[in-house]
Image (tube, rainbow, N blue to C red):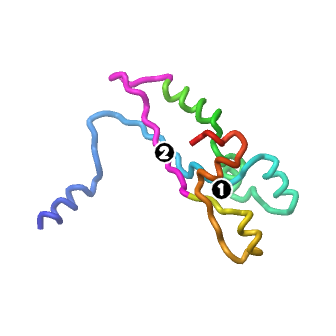
Amino acid sequence: MKNLKSYFSNLPGWRANRKIIVFESDDWGSIRMPSLKSFEELEKAGLNLRTEDAERYNLNDSLATKEDLKKLFEVITSVKDKSGNYAVFTPVAIVANPDFKKIKEADFKEYFYEPFTETLKRSHGCEKSF
């Protein structure tokens, strides 16, 4: 009975007596679209990358470079709350990307993956971004 009472009392969710702004950002580390050049080459090959919601992801999702992160942290540390605290940023990261080389070597009949940290090591500008 105690567990049931606790369950129902938590249904409305967590509450605070102060105003909080939350910025959620997911899929950090995903190698969705490595570059504008890749996007253009795929379009030239006949792939439709501009369908409904796909376009915004295909045009904007790429690995964060060291410079990207530097600029993000400059923005985050440019303001503080009334208690002198900086914003807290927690990226929601993926853990692996497709290993395209191995997939191709297996004639696209098997799936292989690599830790996203390995993807970063091979990606220009991202080598030291983790």
3D distance between C-alphas at marks 2 and 1: 18 Å
Q: Residue at x 54, y 27 (%)?
A: 75
Percent of width and height locating residue 80: 42, 23
Percent of width and height locating residue 71: 60, 30
Q: Amino acid at mark 2?
A: Glu
Range of residues picked out in magenta: 78-95
**Quadrant containing the N terminus in the rendered view:** bottom left
For label 2, the SS is loop
Q: Is residue 75 magenta?
A: no
Q: Is residue 79 magenta?
A: yes
Asked where in the image residue 5 lies, by quadrant, the reply is bottom left
User: Label 2, on which residue?
Assistant: 24
Q: Residue at x 83, y 51 (%)?
A: 40
For label 1, the SS is loop
Q: Which of the pair 71/125 is nearer the observer?
A: 125
Q: Residue at x 68, y 46 (%)?
A: 60
**On the rendered structure, is 117 left or right of 79?**
right
**Residue contact at pointers 2 and 1, CB within 8 angstroms:** no
Q: Which of the pair 29/51 is nearer the observer?
A: 29
Q: Amino acid at mark 1?
A: Asp
Q: Is residue 117 above or below residue 81?
A: below
Q: How many residues crowd around disc 2 within 10 Å: few (fewer than 14), some, or many (20 or more)?
A: few
Q: Residue furthest left?
A: 1
Percent of width and height locating residue 76: 50, 29
Asked where in the image residue 16 lies, by quadrant, the reply is top left
Q: Main secondary structure of the magenta part?
A: loop
User: Label 1, on which residue?
Assistant: 53
Q: Which of the pair 120/28 is nearer the observer?
A: 120
**Quadrant containing the C terminus in the rendered view:** top right
Percent of width and height locating residue 35: 76, 47
Q: Residue furthest bottom?
A: 109
Q: Count numbered badges in the picture.
A: 2
